[in-house]
Structures are given as C-alpha cells and as structure tokens.
C-alpha cells in the first residue's frame, strides 16, 4: 500500500465499505458522485487492488478490502481522537456525520427534537438516519452505524446500552371516528371498527389479538403496513383504527386531525434503548451525541 494517501482518501474507502455504492458514499461524505469516483480510482492505484467490484447496482469489497476495512476504521477513529481536545470539546466546532439506525416510528417522534438540538449546538454536524434492517452488532463494530436506537437489545459484551424510555401502545383514530368521541372505548367497541395493523413481516396477528382472543373477541384487520407512521397516516384519513406507540400518537395528535385513547387491556410495554460500540464510550463527540439523544427523548 502506498504511504502517501491522505485521510480524505481513507474516509472515502471507509464510506464505500459502509455504503456499498459510490452514490451512498458520496451522500455520506457530502461529496459529488464524480469526486467520489475519482477518489475510488486513486484508492485503487494506491492500494494496488480493485478494492471494490460491481455486483448488480452496488459494489462488493474484495478480500483485500475486507481485511483492510477494520484497520482503516481504526486509523480514522484515532485521527478523530487526536483532533478533538477531550477537555475542551466544543460542539459548535464539530464537523461530523452521525449515522443512527432507528425505525420510522421512533424517528418521527424523537428526531425533530434531536435536529433542533443539533442546529442550536452543533450546526456543522449532520444526523443521518437509516432504517432498521439487519440489527446486527457488526455494523456497530465496523463503524457503519454510530448509534442504534430501538427496542431490540444487541446481545454482545462489546456493545454498551442505555434505556431511553418505556412506552405502551394506544389507539389512534380520525377525529371524525365515533371512537374519538368516546371517553374510554371498550374492547367490544374497538372490534366494531376496521383496523390497520403494523408488521414489518406483514403479519395480521399481534399482542392485541391475543388479548381479544382471551375474552372471545376478534378484530377485523383490513390492511397491514410496515410502520406505525404509515398506520397512523392511514387512520387519520379513514375510518380505520391504528395501534401505535404512545409518543407517536401524541406527536400526530398535535399536528393532524386525529385523537388517541388508552387501549382497554394490558399490552406489553416496549423499552427503547440507545446502543453503541464500546470503543466509542469515551469519545467526546459520541458522548455528546448520546446526551442529545437522551435529552430529546425526555
């Protein structure tokens, strides 16, 4: 490997490994696509390896690139640490993109407050939210994800975790729905109305169905969507009932013509965590990020 590569080239390498495409790497680094392509050419010449080869519309790292990726990530983090004065860390001087893995429903209720905090304290920092998909530890280890926010704990000794909050699910309907004018709907009243269900896997059965079945009742699900945001928007513009996280219901009730109500049965509460790799535990910028997430979650 040539010894005259600068950190910017290594940043491009790191982004290409994380994103699997020139376009994704360019967006991650706030570069143009042509500039990122030129950097890839320079990397290939400097490293004496193709580094990435085409696979459909994306790029697949070569064996050499896979071996080099952890070392490059370590070098970049070391350089970042040298550039940050740990005792005099100033968010206003921070120029960094934080990649947060978070589902759509949690993002809708949490990230607006987080973005406002960033704008006020670190205007040159960027939040990049990516949807849930492969909730694995490797993405935290290799640095493609800086922070994971969600309900599923990642069982690994090298991952740090903090509980942000616990919440239950509530019913959400359009204000034109009869349920919106009912102080506390009963299970029987819930079953009189069609439902939109939320499931990433397209399932129509959920915890509410178990509770209904236990008392000999059944709801009528006529639509299944992948996210609670989609369910809430459908309920807002129809006669459907959606069961969504309470924070999301409160968020939409303040902005849309919807009403929410407590579900008249006990449903499992959800615990939302923020999780990160242990190597970032004492990183000043990452500690600041976690603090902002914590405050935005209040």
Image: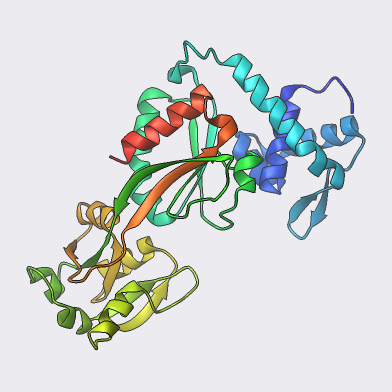
Residue 293 vertical position relative to residue 87 in the rendered view, above or below: below
> Which of the 4 quarters of the picture holds residue 294?
top left
Is 182 in front, or is 214? 214
Is 290 in front, or is 42? 290
Is 38 in front, or is 245? 245
What residue is shown at x 71% (from left), y 36% (from top)?
Answer: 14
What residue is shown at x 45% (from left), y 54% (from top)?
Answer: 103
- Evaluate whether residue 85 shows in this view: yes
Where the N terminus falls, by quadrant? top right
- Residue 208 on image: x %, y %: 30, 74
Is 251 in front, or is 280? 280
Q: Indicate left or right for 224 with 6 as reference.
A: left
Q: Indicate left or right for 247 with 22 as reference.
A: left
Residue 36 vertical position relative to residue 124 in the rendered view, above or below: below
- Residue 279 on image: x %, y %: 59, 31
Q: Residue furthest front?
A: 157
Q: Residue furthest bottom?
A: 216
- Evaluate whether residue 144 shows in this view: no
């Amino acid at each position: 490997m040539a010894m005259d590569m600068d950190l910017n080239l290594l940043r491009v390498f790191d982004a290409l490994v994380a994103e699997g495409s020139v376009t994704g790497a360019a967006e991650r680094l706030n570069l143009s696509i042509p500039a990122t392509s030129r950097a890839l050419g320079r990397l290939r010449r400097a490293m004496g390896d193709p580094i990435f080869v085409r696979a459909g519309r994306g790029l697949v790292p070569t064996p050499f690139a896979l071996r080099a990726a952890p070392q490059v990530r370590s070098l970049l983090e070391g350089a970042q640490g040298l550039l940050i004065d740990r005792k005099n860390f100033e968010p206003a001087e921070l120029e960094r993109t934080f990649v947060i893995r978070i589902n759509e429903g949690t993002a809708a209720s949490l990230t607006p407050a987080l973005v406002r905090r960033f704008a006020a304290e670190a205007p040159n920092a960027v939040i990049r939210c990516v949807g849930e998909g492969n909730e694995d530890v490797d993405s935290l280890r290799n640095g493609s994800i800086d922070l994971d926010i969600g309900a599923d704990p990642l069982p690994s000794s090298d991952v740090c975790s903090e509980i942000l909050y616990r919440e239950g699910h509530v019913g959400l309907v359009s204000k034109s729905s009869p349920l919106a004018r009912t102080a506390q709907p009963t299970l029987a009243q819930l079953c009189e109305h069609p439902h939109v269900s939320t499931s990433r896997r397209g399932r129509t059965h959920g915890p509410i169905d178990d509770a209904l079945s236990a008392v000999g009742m059944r709801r009528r699900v006529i639509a299944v969507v992948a996210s609670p945001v989609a369910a809430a928007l459908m309920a807002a513009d129809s006669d459907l009932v959606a069961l969504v996280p309470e924070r999301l219901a409160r968020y939409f009730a303040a902005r849309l013509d919807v009403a929410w109500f407590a579900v008249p049965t006990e449903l499992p509460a959800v615990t939302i965590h923020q999780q990160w790799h242990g190597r970032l535990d004492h990183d000043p910028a990452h500690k600041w990020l976690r603090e902002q997430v914590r405050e935005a979650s209040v």
